[in-house]
Image: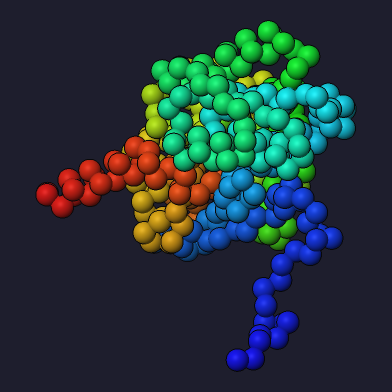
Amino acid sequence: MTGASTADRPRLATTAEALRIVDLIGNTPMVELRCLRESIAPGVTIYGKVEGFNPGGSVKARSAWNLVRRGLESEQLRPGKTILESTSGNTGIALAMIGAALGYPVKLVMPENVSRERKRVLQAYNAETVYSSPMEGSDGAIILCREILAQDPERYFKPDQYNSEYNSEAHYLTTGPEIWKQTGGRVTHLVATIGTSGTVMGTGRFLKEQSHDVQVVAIEPSDSFHGIEGLKHMASSIVPGIWHPEQVDRVVGVDTEDAYDMVYNLAAKDGLLLGQSSGAAVVGALEVARDLTSGVIVVILCDFGDRYLSTNLWLGWRDRHQLAANK
Ligand SMILES: Cc1ncc(COP(=O)(O)O)c(C=O)c1O
């Protein structure tokens, strides 16, 4: 058997290009969400930016790395310090990955009911985890994390993803420019969910600086008791310091069931297995698209779905299919 020529092989990063895993963060691909074509005008295209391709598997690699990078620059993060953060999951995974790569210990506070896959991944990266009450959601984790920090402030570096503008800056510096370039400046709408709001704030700010006409749409769960991991219902939550609602054109509330149905749809029809927040974002994008005759909508797909296989998202899927079959 003769070996494939060099030209046939996929091009891998050389050691000079990717000295560390953090050097591979960003530059994620975009893909058209083709299964939505039949529901929208022919002049409208919806692209998903597939953030699950980031190291650590989510959009949060971008903000976690920018927060750590800025901490190192200012020497607030230096040898001997532990990185401490409250996180509903993806930021924790990103920080744990970055801490492991850079040699810093990481301690994470999160609601006890985050998915089993997430807990295992954090163990693998050797992060320490502290659980807050599952009844109190991400706000319970925020409050417990504040208490831990207050007990020993010198020991910790807290990136403070909810209040540090370095979170949104990550997206201003990377996600926004990537979308502008990938669409050749044709993007008309950005659709992104709100957790800390870093993604929608930073990406939206960059795109609006390129063209005032770009519409920025933020997606939140439609009520406080929702099953969309990573997202915040603003009216009933501790509002992140970096959330500036006047900088978005529209906030759309999405029901959990609609978000889940969209996840099932995208997996079965487009081969894109995503997390529930991506389902919510795409439901929002479709709502925006329905009012348009032309446009290029870019929706941020925060992570892949394989880390939610043991959650209600997929337990519910079986029930719903049985219900449909029995009808
Ligand atoms: C799955 C998922 N979707 C969306 C978001 C929201 O992103 P942001 O914090 O930038 O608003 C997060 C944040 O943790 C997340 O984990």
Q: Residue at x 57, y 26 (%)?
A: 129
Is residue 10 depicted above or below 225 in this figure? below
Q: Residue furthest top?
A: 151
Q: Residue at x 77, y 43 (%)?
A: 173
Q: Nearer the viewer, residue 302 or 212?
A: 302
Q: Residue at x 36, y 51 (%)?
A: 264
Q: Nearer the viewer, residue 2 or 259?
A: 2
Is residue 264 depicted above or below 84 in this figure? below
Q: Viewed as shown, does residue 64 lie left or right of 86? A: right
Question: In x, y percent, where is residue 210?
Answer: 76, 47
Q: Nearer the viewer, residue 214 or 139?
A: 139
Quarter of the rendering occupied by the N terminus: bottom right
Q: Residue at x 54, y 33 (%)?
A: 89
Q: Residue furthest right?
A: 74
Question: In x, y percent, where is residue 283?
Answer: 43, 44
Q: Viewed as shown, does residue 158 lie left or right of 125? A: right
Q: Quadrant of residue 126?
A: top right
Q: Nearer the viewer, residue 315 or 215?
A: 315
Number of marks: 0
Residue 74, can we see it?
Answer: yes
Question: Which coloring applies here?
Answer: rainbow
Q: Residue furthest bottom?
A: 1
Question: In x, y percent, where is residue 23?
Answer: 76, 51
Q: Viewed as shown, does residue 178 lie left or right of 277? A: right
Residue 188, can we see it?
Answer: no
Is residue 81 depicted above or below 254 in this figure? above
Question: In x, y percent, where is residue 308?
Answer: 43, 42
